[in-house]
Amino acid sequence: MSDFLLIQPRPENLGGQPILRPLPSAKCRSVGPFVFFDHILEHTYPAGSGMNINQHPHIGLSTLTYLFEGQLQHKDSLGSNQLVSPGEVSWMTAGHAVAHVERTPQTLWESGSHMHGLQVWLAMPAEDEQGEPSYSHHPASSLPRSTSMGVDICLIAGTGFCLQSPVPVPVLSPTIYAEIKMTAGSALQIPTEHADRALYLIDGGVTVDDQQLPLRGLLVLPEGETYTLSACSESHLVMIGGEPIGPRRINWNFVASDQLLIDQARQRWAAQDWPTVPGETERIELPR
C-alpha cells in the first residue's frame, strides 16, 4: 500500500489482558490528538480471574474506553465508581493529576467473562493539559448513529459523517473517533474534513480504493484525499483522526508538551504526593 502509511501493532500484556498497540510508533507518534491506541484483544477469563490494573497516575491526556464485550469497573481519584458496559464511553481527563483503577467487576470475576474493546489516549491542547481533571460516562443510547445502505456508523467522539458526539473533546482539538460496521457489498466515502485520519480493521475484509485494508494494522491516510471503503464481507472497523496536536512527550502514563511536567509528575508519584482512589491501597510503582 505505497500511498499509505501502515503501522503494524506490537503485542503487549496489560494486567493479564493481551493487547495490540499500534500507537505510539516510531513511524507515527500521533494521529490528530490520538497519541495511544490499544486494541484489547478477545480474551476469555475463567471463573476466579479477570483484568486488574491497580491505581496508577496520568497527566496531560484524556483516556477513552469503549468495549465490544465484557465489562470494566472504573474508579478514580475524583471519587468516580462506574461500571462500563459494551457500547458505552468511559471518558477521563487527567489534567494536572489523576489516578484511576480498571478491573473486571466482582460479579464477572466470580462467574468468568469475555473481554474485547479499545482504549485510546488523546493529548490535551497545551493550554489545557494542566487543567482540572474530570470524568464522564456516556451510555450507548446517547451516542449518535447513522445507518444507510448497509453501513452503520456510531460516532464515539468528535464530529464527522454529519454527526456530533456528546463526549466532551476539547473545542480547540477537532477530533473524529467512529465505529463503522459494514455489510458485504456496502461502501462508504471517507471525507477530507479532518487533516489526520487513520483506519483500523477489527474484523472482516475491506478495500480502500481497491487496495486491501490490512487486518488489525493502523492505516494512516494521506491528507486531503477522499477515499472509498468497500466491504468484501461483513466488517467492523474504527476511524480516528483530527487536527494534529503538535509534538508530545510520553513517559509511562504521562503525556505532556514539556519534559519538565513529566519529570515533576514522576517525582510526585514516586513520593506518593498524588491524589488517591478512595478505598484503594494497592498501586503500580513508577518503572525504573
Image (cartoon, helix red, strand yellow):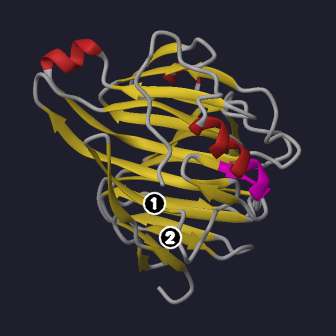
Is residue 239 something that shows in the picture?
Answer: no
Q: Position of residue 138 (x, y in %)?
A: 57, 21
Which residue sits at x=82%, y=32%?
Answer: 131
**Helix, strand or loop at mark 1:** strand
How packed is label 2: few (under 14 Cα within 10 Å), some, or many (20 or more)?
Answer: many
Q: How many marks?
A: 2
Res. 110 mark:
none
Residue 160, above or below 66: below
* Mark 1 residue crowding within 10 angstroms, few (<14) / some (14–19) / many (20+): many
Residue at which label 2 appears? 219
Cβ–Cβ under 8 Å for marks 1 and 2: yes
The amino acid marked with disc number 1 is Tyr
Q: Which residue is mark 1?
A: 200
Front residue of this view, candidates 9 and 219: 9
Seen in the picture, residue 222 relative to 2 is either above or below; the reply is above
**Start and end of the magenta stretch?**
255-261
Q: Position of residue 139 (x, y in %)?
A: 52, 19
Q: Name the element at disc 2.
A: strand
Which corner quadrant of the image does residue 127 belong to?
A: top right
Q: Residue at x 64, y 27 (%)?
A: 274
User: Residue at the location (75% across, 45% down)?
Assistant: 124
Q: Is 146 placed above or below 242 here?
A: above
Q: Residue at x 30, y 59 (%)?
A: 204
Q: Amino acid at mark 2?
A: Leu
In screen coordinates, is 160 left or right of 220? right
Residue 70 included in the magenta stretch of the image: no
Q: Position of residue 156 (x, y in %)?
A: 57, 37
The x and y percentages for residue 99 are 57, 28
Q: Earlier in the sequence, mark 1 or mark 2?
A: 1
The question of residue 256 being in magenta is answered with yes
